[in-house]
Image: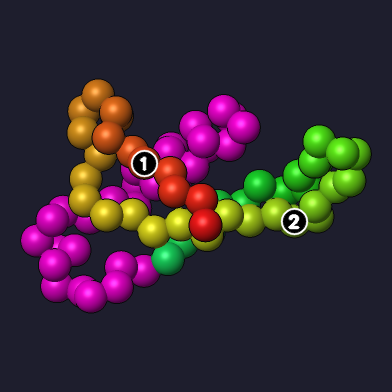
Amino acid sequence: MKNIFVGLLMASTSLLHGPAEAQQSAHPPHSYFELGDLDLELGETLPDARVLFVTHGRLNPERSNAILIPS
């Protein structure tokens, strides 16, 4: 799970927009992070798994302000 979070964080850094740009659009664009075949804890595999995400704001230099909210 930690690897997934790190991957999402790294993928989102190239997609971040400044606050002024974010205010121009009511709904920022959604992006996908490709996980590939995801092995689940009970032994099943979810083929070609993807995570849909959207970014708001800008990642700080310490990279400590990212929040993942599963839905």
**Snapshot colouring:** rainbow
Q: Is residue 12 left or right of residue 44?
A: left
Local packing at callout 1 (Cα closer than 10 Å; few below 14, some 14-19, many 20+) is few
Query: Who is closer to the viewer here, 48 or 46?
Result: 46
List the single residue furthest toward the right.
43
Q: Quadrant of the N terminus?
A: top right
Labels 2 and 1 touching (C-beta < 8 A): no
The image position of residue 66, as x and y in percent, is 33, 38
Disc 1: which residue:
67
Name the amino acid type tagged 2. Asp
Nearer-the-camera pick, 48 or 2: 2
Say what amino acid the circle numbered 1 marks. Answer: Ile
Q: How many marks?
A: 2
Q: Which picture quadrant has residue 62?
A: top left
Q: Picture coordinates of residue 28 (x, y %)?
A: 30, 68
On residue 48, the disc is: 2
Secondary structure mostly seen in magenta is: helix
Could you tell which of marks 2 and 1 lies nearer the N-terminus? 2
Q: Which residues are magenta?
A: 1-29
